[in-house]
Amino acid sequence: MAFPYPHKIRKTMVEQGIPNETISKFEFPDSLQAEKIVSFISQMEEILTPKQCLSIIECQGCSKTGKSDKENRTFGLKYASKTIDERIKLLPESSIPKSVICHLNSNRTLSVFWAFGVEGNYKCVCSGIRKLTEPIKIPRTYCGCCGGHIRHHLQNALFVELHLKKILSSPNTSKGKKRCEFLFEVKEKA
């Protein structure tokens, strides 16, 4: 199942300097049951600042290895000499899912849109969430896990560093009316 793993989140908290006294306030789930993971992410929103939540959750994400990872790295290196605008236009040649739409904003942030379905009836891209049978309120921070997945692959394909600045919308928080929209800060690699 595709969920943010609590033990990896704890490791990221430590790596990012979250104090042990803060980490000790969390009830880390003992299983990957969806409801427990969702509850844990809700705890993050209660205990941490929004900036800390985004910084931690952007480091998560499933499916960061394998064939598409290798292809996106190759794509990024192949077009490293091009501008980011040119690389975005070339993304259809990469292994980034075709349902991902990227737009470079005038302030040099990157808007990334992603969802399954059609306008007005979008579905969550997270297979773990899609498997839930009963309605459950998903904290917006949870969506940053999918943001971490696409961040990883876009960093490689676009040959840039990305930092999740904001989760603007998701099918879960809009009852299917809006796609996931992630806003990333962009830093060119030297």
Image (spheres, rainbow, N blue to C red):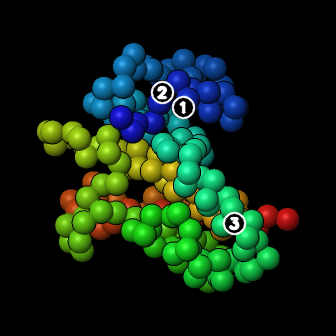
The quadrant of the picture occupied by the C terminus is bottom right
Which quadrant of the view contains residue 173?
bottom left
Instruction: Where is residue 175? Give x, y as percent.
Output: 21, 59
Q: Amino acid at mark 2?
A: Pro
Label 3 Cα crowd, 10 Å radius (few <14 / some 14-19 / many 20+): many
Marks 1 and 2 close (CB-CB < 8 Å)? yes
Q: Which residue is mark 2?
A: 6
Q: Which residue is mark 1?
A: 9
Q: Which residue is mark 3?
A: 76
The residue that appears at 23% across and 41% down in the rendered structure is 131
Camera sees residue 10 = yes
The residues bearing labels 3 and 1 have C-alpha atoms spaced at a distance of: 28 Å
Instruction: Where is residue 17? Give x, y as percent.
Output: 70, 32
Label 2 Cα crowd, 10 Å radius (few <14 / some 14-19 / many 20+): many
Q: Amino acid at mark 1?
A: Ile
Marks 2 and 3 close (CB-CB < 8 Å)? no
The residues bearing labels 2 and 3 have C-alpha atoms spaced at a distance of: 31 Å
Instruction: Where is residue 36? Give x, y as percent.
Output: 32, 26
The residue that appears at 79% across and 76% down in the rendered structure is 81
The residue that appears at 50% across and 20% down in the rendered structure is 25
Instruction: Where is residue 65? Give x, y as percent.
Output: 57, 44
Left or right: 26 with respect to 109?
Answer: left
Question: Which secondary structure lies at badge 2?
Answer: helix
The quadrant of the picture occupied by the N terminus is top left
- Sequence-wise, the earlier of marks 2 and 3 is 2
Question: Which secondary structure lies at badge 3?
Answer: helix
Which one is in front, 120 or 157?
157
Left or right: 26 with respect to 12?
Answer: left
In this rendering, the answer to whether 112 lies above or below 134 is: below
Task: Give the label on residue 106, or none.
Answer: none
Q: Nearer the viewer, mark 3 or mark 1?
A: 3
Camera sees residue 50 = no
